[in-house]
Image (spheres, grey):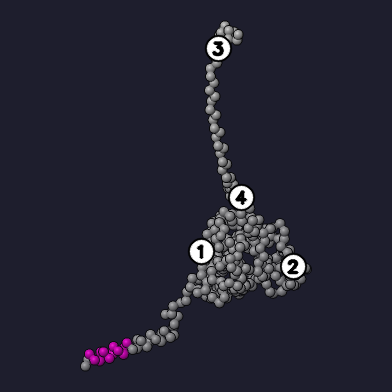
Amino acid sequence: MKCRQVMVQWLRSLILLGFSLGIVLILQPSTFALMPSRKLPQVADVVEVSPPETIQQLRTKMEQYQPQVKILSPAADQLIKDDRVSVRFEVKDLPIFKDKTLGLGPHLHVFLDNQPYQAVYDLSQPLVFKEVAPGTHTIRVVAARPWFESFKNPEAYAQVTFHIFIQTEENKPTPHQPLLTYSQPQGSFGTETVLLDFYLSPSPASTSPNNQAANWQVLVSINGSSFYVEDWQPLYIQGLKPGKNWVRLQLMDRQGRKIDNAFNDTIRIVELREQGEDPFSRLMRGDLSAIEAGGMIDPNYKRPQPPAIKSAEPPQPSAAPLPTPAPEIQEPAVKVPQKMRSKHLK
């Protein structure tokens, strides 16, 4: 009887324990549920791949540069009484040029407000924006490698806000607030490997005590698939579909809340073509070697010339040796004595 009572009490305790556990699971599901992974490889449609080997080789050769970019004009808060804006730049510690053979080289990405950037390969001429709408505008510029990947040092970026005829509230980033600049992908590509890249300012590498840029993550959405990027590194991805795709970058804090600032939410249309023959597509596919692409990282680069191939001439038939004539056999001359000759002639 006593044993039976103990068993009943044990069963009651077990039932109460199970009931309590169920309540906890209902009230606090996040404690026990598996958190979804935010790592890129978990995204069904988009996968991260290694950078092309040629780009890895060229990238090491460009690590010597720490570009310093300045916007010389327009000036900060300048009021321009024209709808035409002439922009001039100064760049130190990075040669800006375009290789004549490949049409690529170190350059600047220049953004007017949140429009797609324009690439600048020549600093001797100003970049002119025409028919700029009245109001406040911001120009951002970042130094980029020949394959469109932005440099990440703090001095590689500059921005200036100015006004056309009148000052307004749009296109005006809040100073010292984290700002996202969407860089890549942009435009049209002839390869399935695509570069995903952006610039953050103030730079997370800054040591300023007021720097809040470390509390960030970028929410990337590509055709509906989303993932977070928490490392400020370029990503090489595959998974875009042939034709037109949409890519969206949003700057968030580590708690998943939007960081409000101008340009922190950007969407681009990206077109993917098949087997493009332009130099950049060939570079991304690995069809160009580092030797072939060396001219886009060094303005004084001399491509090695292939060895001259001599035309093969058919062997000339050797002349048949002439037969050696047999030596003439001459009979020895017989001397006739004078007396005998005379006698004979008679």
Labels 3 and 2 touching (C-beta < 8 A):
no
| Mark 4, other Cα within 10 Å: few <14 / some 14–19 / many ≥20 | few
Kind of residue sitting beneath label 1: Ser
Task: Residue 41: tell me if it is visible.
Answer: yes
Residue drawn at x 73%, y 70% is 132
Of discs 3 and 2, which sits in the foreground? Answer: 3
Which mark identifies residue 50?
A: 1
In the image, 40 versus 339, the foreground residue is 339
C-alpha gap between disc 4 and disc 2: 38 Å
Residue bearing mark 2: 130
Residue bearing mark 4: 302
Which mark identifies residue 335?
A: 3
Residue 146 sits in which quadrant? bottom right
Kind of residue sitting beneath label 3: Lys
Under tag 3, what secondary structure?
A: loop
First in sequence, mark 4 or 2: give its number.
2
C-alpha gap between disc 3 and disc 1: 107 Å
Residue 316 sits in which quadrant? top right
Taking the magenta stretch, the answer to whether it contains residue 156 is no
Which mark identifies residue 98?
A: none
